[in-house]
Image (spheres, rainbow, N blue to C red):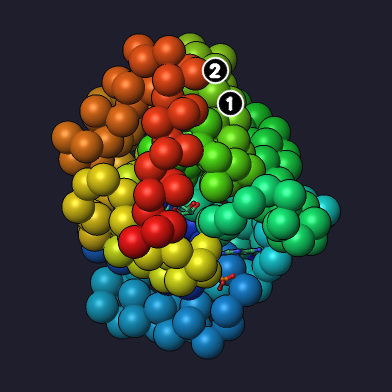
Amino acid sequence: MTNRDATRPFAVITGASRGIGAEYARALASRGYDLLLVARDRARLDRLAEDLTTQHQVHADIALLDLAEPEAAHRLYTAAREFRPAVDLLINNAGFGSVGEFVAMPMARIQAMLRLHVNTIVESSRLFLPGMIERRSGAMINVASTAGFMPIAGMTEYAATKTFLIAFSEALAEEVRPYAVRVQVCCPGATLTDFHHTAGSHPKGPFKAQTAEEVVAASLNALGSGRTVVTTHWSGTLTDWLGRWVPRGVLARGAAWWMRRSKQR
Ligand SMILES: NC(=O)c1ccc[n+]([C@@H]2O[C@H](COP(=O)([O-])OP(=O)(O)OC[C@H]3O[C@@H](n4cnc5c(N)ncnc54)[C@H](OP(=O)(O)O)[C@@H]3O)[C@@H](O)[C@H]2O)c1
């Protein structure tokens, strides 16, 4: 659906059908954003788009995309441009977890995770950022995880894709900063969503789980400050600090010990 004349800001949110993505959608609609909500679950997206349109008088549309498919970034870019040529905020949030031994993980699941957390986000950045740079305005939020602050045996590929996303976002933020474009990497700790069910785990980090509302409030509040790495709660700040200052070998063994201990409980 085209929406070219609107004067409201426009955000594209991936993984908007539930959890943190749906919460970004609610928070941005309440701030007057028009929205393109992206995921695979049509029923949930339709319901959310309808609710937001009714409650906030914004324009919310949906795009059904499997972002783990090879051409997903191009499809996302095309869908966004059909809605409106200029995107003010892109939120790359879609993701899923996997808990278990890497060598026992189905190859298809590993490939889907790499495409979703790495390829699609890198390619989307390459497609969406030039327009923002040209307009000297716009922002991108990549949702990573505190798991990206360290190597985690038992969540090996999940943590590694999020480590990539943090490093990618930190460098990219500096490349685009001179053009008044912002890149943020939001790193939630355990958050109460369907994520843990999909990953085959329970939210059992060492700290109390947060709500999606808390994560999104911290992320959107930080957007104005220009901070690149955003954590929520003091536990997120502590995990970030541990990841930067504790020797990698100690961190890797500590995280492996924690994962083994959690499995026994
Ligand atoms: N919850 C946590 O504890 C936690 C902690 C740290 C980081 N995170 C990160 O936060 C982000 C959001 O997770 P969440 O907690 O909100 O989990 P969630 O409730 O399971 O939501 C995941 C979202 O991603 C979408 N998605 C998954 N695979 C997709 C695909 N192939 N194509 C398109 N969309 C896809 C899902 O939509 P459909 O199924 O409808 O496609 C859903 O909207 C993820 O990147 C996750 O890694 C979560």
Q: Quadrant of the C terminus?
A: bottom left
The reply to whether residue 149 is in sight is no
Q: Quadrant of the N terminus?
A: bottom right
Q: Tell whether label 2 touches label 1 (CB within 8 Å).
A: yes
Disc 1 target residue? 168
Q: Of 128 and 66, which appears nearest the observer?
A: 66
Dot label at residue 88: none
Quadrant of the image occupied by residue 134? top right
Quadrant of the image occupied by residue 224? top left
Q: How many other residues sit within 10 Å of disc 2, few (<14), some (14-19) or many (≥20)? A: few
Task: Estimate the spatial distance between the alpha carbons at disc 1 and disc 2, rounded to whole Å.
Answer: 6 Å
**In the rendered structure, which amino acid carries the disc numbered 2?**
Ala
Q: Secondary structure at mark 2?
A: helix
Residue at x 73% of width, y 49% of height:
103
Disc 2 target residue? 171
Give how far across and how far down residue 227 sits, in percent.
32, 24
Residue at x 32% of width, y 56% of height:
204
Residue at x 40% of width, y 59% of height:
264
